[in-house]
Amino acid sequence: MGPLGVSNSKYRRCIVHFVSIATSCILFSYRYDRNTGKERKDVFQAPPPVIMFSGSGLNSSKGLRRQKRDWVIPPINVAENSRGPFPQMLVSIRSDQDQDISIRYSITGVGADQPPNEVFNIDPVLGKMFVTKPLDREHRSSYHLRAHAVDMNGNQVENPIDLYIFVIDMNDNRPEFKNQVYNGSVDEGSKPGTYVMHLSAFDADDNTTANGMVRYRILSQTPHSPIPNMFTINSETGDIVTVAPGLDREKVSQYTIIVQATDMEGNLNFGLSNTATAIITVTDINDNPPMLTSRTFSGEVPENRVDVVVANLTVIDADQAHSPNWNAIYQIISGDQFGHFTIRTDPVTNDGMVTVVKPVDFEMNRSFMLKVAVSNQAHLASGIQSSLQSTADVTISVQDVNEPPYFPTNPKHIRFEEGVPAGTSLTTFSASDPDRLHMQSIRYSKLNDPADWLSINRTNGQIVTTGMLDRESIYVKNNIYEATFLATDNGSPAASGTGTLQIYLIDINDNPPALIPKESQICERMNKNVNGVNITAADADTDPNAGPFVFELPNFPTSIRRNWTISRISGDYARLGLRYQVYLEPGVYEVPIIVSDSGNPPLSNRSVIKVKVCPCDENGDCTTLGAVAAAGLGTGAIISILICVIILLSMVLLFVVWIKRREKERQTKQLLIDPEDDVRDNILKYDEEGGGEEDQDYDLSQLQQPDSLEHIISKPPGVRRVDERPIIPESQYPIRPVVPHPGDIGDFIHEGLRAADNDPTAPPYDSLLVFDYEGSGSTAGSVSSLNSSSTGDQDYDYLNDWGPRFKKLADMYGGGDDD
């Protein structure tokens, strides 16, 4: 018989779990049901226990034990997710004094009178404690309550007791992966047992029980090459490792694995499961050496060309493209001892481009036989050997072209004295033709000769002067004259080369010195501190044909040596001064001086220096008056200049006064029309119509004459509206005659001005004038009576009395004199 009185012979297995609830038990029995083919769980629960307060003196047979006069209450275990019915009784609490007095029971703590409230409650009379709803261990795993017993007056009868309620975990949570897809990698060719990646799942259930113990397994692998089970996973840690050899990126570059996580220690019958995807990338290693597609390659190159691709080497490599395992590196093993070629790798195609980096000469090498090898940027993996196709032979043929002649010495340096006459042979500047097998002829010509001093023989290259060489010419830099010549062969096509001839010109004494400065000034009387003018000389030649210089005064005229003297300061400087006790009138004096250089033979030059002799102050500086006098202006000339300046200023002042007066007159006669502004004989243009009536927003009612003046008269004094009719009496101006008064229109304007000034009813000049009121009528009457008929008997002879300005109008209407 089994522990529950069930015969083991009738069932495959019987599992009994005892779960303590206070002093009672919950019994779980799992047995196999032959009718349904599944396991069945039976639950047996003992009646709830009774917990007495510490003063009741219960013995240990009730599940309590005494320790230092306090009772230790065992915890109350409650299964989570219970289906009820609720409220479900957990325990009964009572005091041994309830036989004598009425007791009221209560509980406090989280879950009772603190949030979450009313999870637990107690019958205040009977002391029965209930749970009111299903508990969730993942939300809260335990509760700490205190039970109280008081009498009807609220007095404490017993000391509070502590109640600990633990929520028993049930397997109600599946394992959850942090990610649905995990990525890992492993090198191709890895050995079995190589770590690949790690997966982990979390179960919210209690991990100290089987409910939270997760186990892993691989459900599937895609693809199945080379075998279906290339990987395995540690069931407890979730580490994936290789289990078989044969990983080859060139065949399978990626695997997809479905991993399952199951709780209940991996029990598929009772446990809950979840899945995740692991993507394993097979990384490349250099297990495939590069191989040239051919054992021989060929190409050709013209001689004297550089940066030209002469051959293209193609290669294949099964490793991952554009990686160090795939990138090819080419090198020339033999056949290029002078370094004419190099092989560059095309970054896109990985081909090798044989390139010329140093010109080749057909006359020296007509072909090259190169042996090249190719390898990868990364070293080959361990155990991988190089292929025989990693080397190849490259044949490069050199094409002959017509090469230009060249000057063996370029530039060529020669030395000559300046001043050689025209027709002097300087040197032979000949070129060589590198095409020695063709026996071509060379012709010479001048390419650049800045001073046009040279010529070259067309056949032999002899250079002859055509002009005198001058070292002091602007075309000579640092004593060197440079010319460029051209050598051209008769090949097809013709080729030419250039050569430079540099002539170092040796100086000769061909330039006399020149005196410096050309002008100076000196005091009219000798001063010990300032006693002359420092002079020197400039010579276009160089040493030894320049300084030191010799300065001398000429013998003629005799007054020069009588008044002036020269004293030597140094080899290049001397001092010109007046002789002692010699007095000269202020003015400008021309002093001739002979300057000689140190050439062999020496060259002399007679130069003139203009010296201003002037009165000086105590510092030896010319005074202002002295400077003017020295410039050659006498007292009379200075007075004349001052008078001219005064007259000019007076004229400017008179002109300004006249302008001011004329402006004032124009302001006093502003009503008169200037002759320049008279427009009676001018043609006026009035064709600017503006924006039209549609663009205007005028209130025409403001221009209408009001019917009544009462609203104006009744208004208080002050500023009137500009659209109101004035209330002052109208002015009575004299009626003009029908025929205009003869004379100028200026008289007409003055007559109107006098009438306005004498009008007592006219407003002052600074008052507000109203111009929008037209009055009660017009003295001109209606214009409808006017007509333009030419058949009337109107007399226009009076137009002749209006002056010359109306003569044309009088001729048109009055008839005038017949021509």
Image (spheres, rainbow, N blue to C red):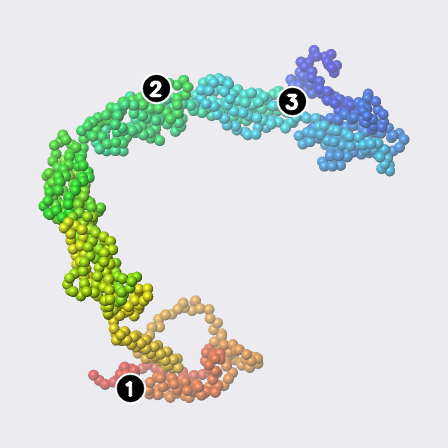
Q: CA distance from mark 1 to mark 2?
A: 129 Å
Q: Label for residue 800?
A: 1
The quadrant holding residue 157 is: top right
Percent position of residue 283, x then y: 45, 25
Indicate whether 762 appears above or below 425: below
Residue ranking furthest to the front? 581
Q: Quadrant of the N terminus?
A: top right
Q: Amino acid at mark 2?
A: Ser
Q: Name which of mark 1 and mark 2 comes first in the sequence.
A: 2
Seen at 85% across and 29% down, the residue is: 95
Seen at 69% across and 15% down, the residue is: 14
Percent position of residue 625, x then y: 29, 70
Seen at 24% across and 26% down, the residue is: 396
Of marks 1 and 3, the one in the foreground:
3
Q: Name which of mark 1 and mark 3 comes first in the sequence.
A: 3
Q: Label for residue 387?
A: 2
Q: Label for residue 210?
A: 3
Q: CA distance from mark 3 to mark 2?
A: 58 Å
Secondary structure beneath dot 1 equals: helix
**CA neighbours of label 1 inside 10 A, class few (<14), some (14 to 19), many (20+):** some
Q: Amino acid at mark 1?
A: Asn
The quadrant holding residue 3 is: top right
Q: Horizontally, is 129 left or right of 730 in the view?
A: right
Residue 11 in sight in this render: yes
Indicate whether 667 appears above or below 29: below
**CA neighbours of label 3 inside 10 A, class few (<14), some (14 to 19), many (20+):** some
Of marks 1 and 2, the one in the foreground:
2
Residue ranking furthest to the right? 100
